[in-house]
Each structure stands twice: as C-alpha cells, then as structure tokens.
Amino acid sequence: MFESSSSGPAKRPQESEPTLFALYFAFANKRPEGKLLCENEALSGSSLRTGDAVVVEAELEGHPKGSFAFKVTNTHWPNLDINDQSPEQVVTGRIEGAMIQDNFTKQNVRMTGSGWGEAKRHVNVIEPNARFYVATAFHEYELPTTKDYAVARKDDKGVLQILKPRELHIPDEDIEQKQQMHIGHIEVLMEKFGFDEFDFLKCEEEEGADMEAPEKSKLYEDKTFLAHYVHSVKDGNRFMIFNKKTRQMVACKYFDLEDQNMLQVAYADLTHSKDVKVEEDPVGSLTIAGIYRSCAAVVTFTSSPELGLDTVSYRPSDADAMKYLKLPNIGNRRKAFVPTPDIQLWPHNDVRVTVGGSGFHDVERKYPGTLEELKKIISAESLPDGKHVFQIGGKKIKIKNLDDVFEDILHA
C-alpha cells in the first residue's frame, strides 16, 4: 500500500522515546492489583496514533511472563471512499523487548491482528489471550500470547499517560456536532421515503446479536426517486437514494462499533454510466458496489468523533483518471479497469493520496515512478463557503458540501 501527503501539520521537534523499562513501570504502576488494564477487551488498530506505544504483558509457553512494546511509527487510512467494509487504519511500528529477537526489533512491521493460527484470526486488533501478529513486506511474525496491555500516549503537555482501551475514545465535540446534524438530515429522508421503522444508528437490535444474522431491506419508488434501505449487523446500515431525473446516486452508511461510530455519505453522478441500470434492477443496482460498477467519480464524506475522522475523499472517474492522470486501463475487452487513487482532504487542507490493491501494484511495476508523478498533479483545498476543490492534472472539480447534497434531495 502506498500513501503520500502533499501537505500537513508542522512536525514537532523530535523527543526522546521512553524506554521499555519506563513504559512497563508506568503500566504496572497504573494497574489495580488483581485486575487487567485491558479489561479483557480487544484494541482496534484504528484507535492508535503515531507516537503511541502499546505495552504488552505476554506469556510464552515454557517461559515466565515477560513484556514487549509495539511503538507506532506511522498510521494511515488507505481507503476512505465508501465501500462494503468498514475502513480500517493501517498501523506500522517497531517491536521492542527481551522476548523479541534483536534482529527483528530493527524492522518496521505492520500490525496484522491477533488469533490462534491462520484459521482463527481477528484482523487489525490486539486481543488478550491470543497471539499478536505483525508482518513485513515478506514475512509474518507470531509473537507471544498477550495477557494484558495498555496504550502509552503523551498528552498535550507531553506527559506520558497509560490508557485503557475505553480511554482512547474521547469524542471530538466539533466532529460530533457536525455528524449529529447530518444524521438528522438522514432521518428526515428516511421518513420521507417510508423507512422510519428502521433505526439508522442501531446496527444491533439486541445485545450480542448474531453477526451473521440475515439482512433486512425495504424498497421505495415514486416518479422522481428510487430508494433502498438495508439493515445489517455485520456490514452496517445502508441507505441508498437515486434521483431518476438528475441520475445522482447518494449512499449513506453507518457503522456502530462499540465505543466508536463512523458515518459515511457518498454521491456519484451516473449520467454517463452504461453498466448500472438502476430502474431495471433497483435492488441489485442501489448498492455501494453499484456505485463503483458505474466507473463514475465518487465523493465520500467520512466522520467519526471517536477516531477524529472528518474527511472528504474524491475518487476520479475511470475516464478522468486516464485523461488527466494518465493512468492505464488494465482491464480486458469485456470490462475496463482503471486503478484510480483515493484523494483524501483532511482538516487544515492536509491532502493525502492513497493507492493500493493489485491493480496499482501492476501499474507501478510496469511504469515505475507512477506514484511520484501522481503527487505532482493532484491537489485539493477546502473553501471558506464550506465547499471543496480537487484538482487532477488540468481539471478542477468543485465539490458540494454535504448539507447541499441533502437539500437537493429534500427539495427535488
């Protein structure tokens, strides 16, 4: 996976890292006697920040308990455009500790998950009573069994804090306020289309609901709109709207992940799409996958108060990616495939370009330096009126803000 940032916040002067002894001393000092700091909960990699250190008390069969630390050196979100899975942050760092081989500690590794072998793996989490897995580009490593853990993080004053999993999720008030306003718009639209029997914010109908429970769905149609609602415990609730006159599709998706939530709203203009025939097959076409089958440009707004996410992503259409970014069509005669980038606009006009998957790797192998060339011809910024401008090559695209997207549907 490749990731670049053309701008960003100023970097702080480098500070000395706390030693493993200092980290474990602080960890042991905070832990109540006879209790676990992790409180038997799993930790998602999406909760970590660059500069964090996960302090792990671990056990290796035939050896006394020991400890190691996973020091986070980089985090990025490789894919924040809307898709069928919940986006996850990629976390890389270094492992340090007496339980770890010396030559291994010098490598940057990616957090891959926890489990009990290949068949039973929970991806991108650290979990008590399970082995912790990390990987380089060429090899995956199985670490000792995690017994307890906590996250060491410096506060705004530079003071090291030892945090339990639940203490990592302090909501950002500004993002929360904005998200609640957008959810209010969605609930009004659900009532407009007769979906008010569903609770958009509730993926689980009861505590401990079966993740494999069948989805529930409902379809609506009038002269102007087609709408489709899907309730899913596993994949989040989805609310799809299609305007027959303007050919615009809007997708709303909500994930309820215990102490975290994530709202994604995307829109695409399907005017020139020939592959998605919404009126002929509304249930099959009014889906997130249907947006991408259209090969149209997709704009996605993502927010999560607990994870500090408030981004706008733009994925160019296949046609624009070929014309303005000079990316090749690597599909076949039956189906085109252009590995388009995900251009992310974060607060303070921090622009990040991510590209991944086998498609782009194929391009990079055939045309070395493609990513570097993309960095030079992609830019984006937020405007004072709340709208956003993306530029790919010689083309500028002005993006509506999310309030305007909802207003267009309400007053159509």
Image: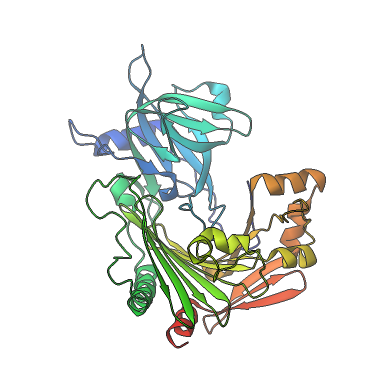
Task: Relative to 110, say whether 57 is above or below.
Answer: above
Q: Nearer the viewer, residue 279 or 175?
A: 279
Determine the residue located farthest toward the right in the rendered image. 367
Q: Position of residue 377 (x, y in %)?
A: 75, 65
Q: Nearer the viewer, residue 152 or 263?
A: 263
Q: Nearer the viewer, residue 407 or 238?
A: 238
Determine the residue located farthest toward the top in the rendered image. 62
Report if residue 103 is visible in the image: yes
User: How does the figure colour the protein chain or chains?
Assistant: rainbow
Q: Is residue 61 left or right of residue 96?
A: left
**Numbered-mark total:** 0
Task: Relative to 149, say whether 226 is above or below.
Answer: below
Task: Relative to 62, say whether 55 is above or below.
Answer: below
Q: Position of residue 99 (x, y in %)?
A: 44, 21
Q: Is residue 292 left or right of residue 126?
A: right
Q: Is residue 392 left or right of residue 21?
A: right
- Which residue is at a point 27% across and 69% down the rendered structure image? 197
Q: Position of residue 48 (x, y in %)?
A: 43, 48
- Which residue is at a point 66% across and 69% down the rendered structure image? 273
Q: Nearer the viewer, residue 162 or 376?
A: 376
Q: Position of residue 172 (x, y in %)?
A: 36, 64
